[in-house]
Image (cartoon, helix red, strand yellow):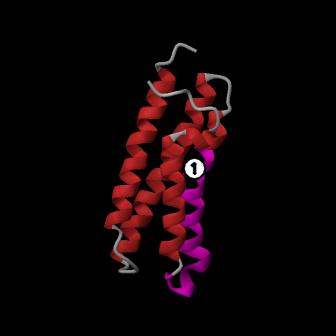
């Protein structure tokens, strides 16, 4: 059985979300300069929000507060899902690998939120 996480950095879901953020930074480096304050900025903000809300929710005391932050992270994840579709449709880059990465974060985040809801504490 796995040890309980001591910090948000111990959470696999946060680790995968952080890797997704780093991937988005690499992806958007090659976007047209005209997208700097539009898609590039929005994409980075939404990706960061996933990992940041997991981190912030980790320290919340109540289940309700924890799950609220996981739900905010899920909303940002869906925003990123749209930005991946848009990036692909605008032919800025192929997004298939990042879509798979995001799907993994999504599954882990759903599982983590469910485990919080079903925990005894």
Residue at left offset 36%, top offset 66%: 85
Residue 25 in the image: above or below residue 11: below
Whether residue 12 appears in magenta in the rendering, the answer is no
Find the magenta span and give its range: 30-54
- Position of 111 with respect to 51 (left or right) is left
Find residue 21 and report its horizontal and vertical position in percent.
Answer: 54, 60
Furthest-top residue in view? 120
Q: Position of residue 109 (x, y in %)?
A: 46, 40
When the figure is inspected, residue 3 is found, relative to residue 30, above or below; the finding is above
The N terminus is located in which quarter? top left
- Side of 5 where 92 appears, left or right: left
What residue does disc 1 label? 51
Image x and y of residue 84, in percent: 40, 65
Q: Secondary structure at mark 1?
A: helix
Along the viewing direction, whichever of 79 and 100 lies nearer the viewer: 100
Instruction: Identify the image quadrant of residue 46.
Output: bottom right
Q: Residue visible at 44% across and 65% down?
A: 83
Decide if residue 24 is on the left or right side of residue 9: left
């Amino acid at each position: 059985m796995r040890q309980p996480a001591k910090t948000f950095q111990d959470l696999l879901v946060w680790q995968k979300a952080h890797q997704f953020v780093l991937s988005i930074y690499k992806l958007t480096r090659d976007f047209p300069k005209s997208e700097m304050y539009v898609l590039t900025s929005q994409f980075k903000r939404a990706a960061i929000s996933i990992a940041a809300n997991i981190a912030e929710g980790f320290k919340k005391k109540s289940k309700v507060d924890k799950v609220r932050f996981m739900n905010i992270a899920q909303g940002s994840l869906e925003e990123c899902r749209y930005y991946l579709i848009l990036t692909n449709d605008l032919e800025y880059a192929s997004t298939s690998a990042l879509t798979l990465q995001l799907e993994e974060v999504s599954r882990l985040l759903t599982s983590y939120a469910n485990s919080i809801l079903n925990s005894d504490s």
